Every structure is written in C-alpha cells, then in structure tokens.
Image (cartoon, grey):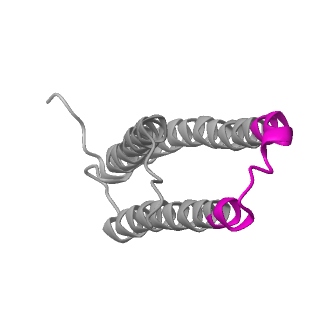
Amino acid sequence: MTVNVFAVPVFFVVFRETLETAVIVSVLLAFLKQTLDGPNRDRAVYKKLVKQVWYGTIAGLLCCLIIGAGMIGAFYGLGKDRWANTEYYWEGSFAIFASVVISILGAALLRVSKMQEKWRVKLAKALETQKVTTGVEEGR
C-alpha cells in the first residue's frame, strides 16, 4: 500500500520558492559580474566568489532537504500531526529568523555599495596622480 504524499498547494509553494531562489542567485551573480568583471578585473577573486555563491546555494538546498526529510519522517513516523497546536509559534519564529537574515544581507549589500564608491574615488585619484607624475596631458 502506497501513501500519497503529493499535495498541489505544497507544490506551488515549493515552485514559488524555487523561482525566488533563482532570482536571488541570478542577482548575486549579476552583482559580482558588474562589480568584479570590469576592465580592471581580478579574475581569481571573481571566480572564487562565484563558486561561493554556488556552494552556498547547494548547501542551502541540502539543509532544506535534510530538514524536510526529517519533518516528513517524524510526521509519518508518529502518525499524528504534533505541530498543529504550535503552528503559529513555528510560523512566527521562522518569520523572525527570515527577517534577521534579510536585514543582515541588506546591511551588507548597502555597505558594499558604499565601499564600491570609495574604491572608485581612490582609483580616480590614483589615475589623476599617475597622469601628473608621468606628464601626460589630455586634449592636446
């Protein structure tokens, strides 16, 4: 006797989350390409960070699969829905955890953009001093 574990609402939630993950990974990769793959690129750092994005994505997927398998195993092993009484506590704790993670990520991304602007100013100053010391003048 087989147990039917497929549920259409769960499928749509997982599908939506997969699309969101794809968007986040593509934004991270585009950000790395825009920031580190320009004319003054450091190819080794770029490749290392791209690998870190993919390793993080795979690690997140594995964590979700392990936790999901544990919850499904516990649900069918116990034969009773023990989470129904504490459903709101679970939802609230996961929402708070997600808010903390998103806040930390947002703060880090804001800091990176400020650092990027500082580096642009430093590079512009370095190029200006290089033009002055070499005696190269533009427009003549």
Q: Residue at x 30, y 53 (%)?
A: 37
* Left or right relative to 101: residue 140: left
Q: Could you say which quadrant of the image residue 8 lies in?
A: top left
Q: Nearer the viewer, residue 113 or 129?
A: 113
In the picture, measured across the screen, residue 2 lies left or right of residue 60, that is left
Task: Give the position of the N terminus as an image quadrant.
Answer: bottom left
Q: Quadrant of residue 79?
A: bottom right
* Quarter of the rendering occupied by the C terminus: top left
Residue 9, above or below 22: above
Q: Residue furthest top?
A: 139
> What residue sits 57% from the left and 59% below the top?
64
Up the image or down, 16 lies above or below 126; here it is above
Q: Looking at the rendering, which quadrant does residue 127 occupy?
A: top left
Q: In the displayed image of the protein, which residue is found farthest to the left? A: 140
Q: Is residue 127 above or below residue 95?
A: below
At which x and y percent is residue 132? Answer: 37, 44
- Residue 110 rendering spot, x and y as whole percentages: 61, 34
- Tell me the chief SS of the magenta region: helix
User: Which residue is at the front of the view, 48 or 7?
Assistant: 7
From which residue to which does the magenta span run? 73-92
Picture coordinates of residue 114, whole percent (x, y):
59, 36
Q: How many marks?
A: 0
Residue 35, percent from left and from top: 39, 46
The residue positioned 85% from the left and 39% from the top of the image is: 85
Q: Is residue 127 left or right of residue 116?
A: left
